[in-house]
Amino acid sequence: MNIKSIHAAVVDLSPNQTTEPRVPKQPTEGFISPMERYPEFKKADWGNKWARVACVVTAEDGTWGLGTTINSGPVENIINTHFSPLLTGQNCMATEKIWDIMRRSASPYHAAGIPSYAISAVDNALWDLKGKILQRPVYELLGGPQKDKIFCYASNTDISYGTENSIDWFLELGFKAVKLFARYGAESGIEGIRKTEELVAKTREQIGDDVELMLDGWMSFNVEYTVRLVEALKPYRLKWLEDYVLPEDMDSYMKIRQRVPGQILATGEHWHTIHPFAVAASQGLVDIFQPDVQWVGGVTALVRICHIAEAHGQTVISHAGMNYPYGQHVSYAMPAIQWGERSEGVSPPGVPLEERVSLPGTPVIKNGYLTPSNAPGFGIEVTKDWLESRAV
């Protein structure tokens, strides 16, 4: 069966939250940023204003699949004016061929960048479509369930309610692993190291010894700062340090690996397509790959990355993989993926996880674990009318 149409549109997928948080928002010292050396720019100022994109791929019989991603400005245009004319008429079941066509056709403007987001949306929509046509959940198309359920951790991406309040809520929800975000980067020097140690020490005391703790540097460290920080944080038993230098700075990844051989290192949410992961695996630069299935090139790319990791004795945790059905299905099927991340703030203190679902039909974490939907495709329960009502 062939593709009849591919169309992308800007959408607002904000969750329908009705419960008021049990604590008010609090003043914060700000979120860590690779722009820290330029204090005149706050994240709200330098970050782009692009929204989310929904991509619908429709087959000749009217069956359709849905993929979503971010960076609507250029991504919507790439899908509608480049990929759509190129792929219309192709066999909608030929996900390998179509992924390769998109990657190669985008190579003149570098597929491992903004085009990767567009590739992801189309690829995930095709997997959703394939599952619906075959009347099977996507995880079965990927080989079937490899685990009974997915162990999930909570990332404190929303610090506006106070980290201590959010961590308490995560523990109440049943999470047995939590991730903090550093507030200070390389520009902060010894004061930043001291304050980060205070944050990590306080959280370790709060969660006790039986809950795993991780730290995210969100591209804001350098080699010296990372080495010094790792030394300072040894007493608090971090499971991993994540995303600590700029994503393209492979030389710094190599130097840090050499300087802190005892620290588990993780990264990859800002790497696109498969090649950075292949380089990192061959050089042993990190221990855990963290590709985002809605950014890296879709299900097709993420499965390849899992195989690369397995061949090199490494593991994979899909960035934000538990937020949407796409990451849930791949995580359920792939042996290389051992954990799942719930981010996007998880939920404000006191707000049920059910109220933080962006796409209806997305299963919710229960007591720290998740099992994907067994409905056809990704199990997303939306109509085209619903999508149109969310169009921006």
Image (tube, grey):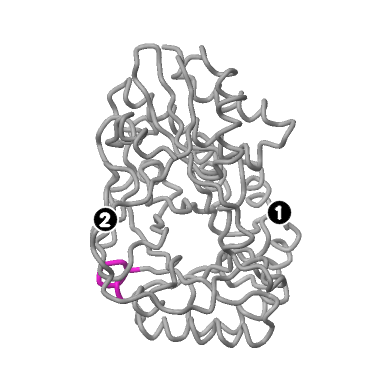
**Above or below: residue 45 compared with residue 198:** above
Question: Could you say which is closer to the camera, residue 282 or residue 85?
Answer: 85
Crowding at dot 2, Cα within 10 Å, few <14 / some 14-19 / many 20+, comes out as some
**Above or below: residue 103 compared with residue 241:** above
Magenta stretch, overall SS: helix
Question: Could you say which is closer to the camera, residue 143 or residue 38?
Answer: 38
For the point 52% across and 45% down, the residue is 70
Q: Secondary structure at mark 2?
A: helix
Magenta range? 168-176
Q: Is residue 197 left or right of residue 160?
A: right
**Above or below: residue 84 compared with residue 37:** above
Mark 1 lies on residue: 248
- The mark found on residue 355 in the picture is 2
Quadrant showing the N terminus: top left
Quadrant showing the C terminus: top left
Hey, which quadrant is residue 230 in on the image? bottom right
Q: Contact, CB < 8 Å: mark 2 with mark 1?
A: no
Crowding at dot 1, Cα within 10 Å, few <14 / some 14-19 / many 20+, comes out as few
Hey, which quadrant is residue 233 in on the image? bottom right
Q: Is residue 44 left or right of residue 373?
A: right
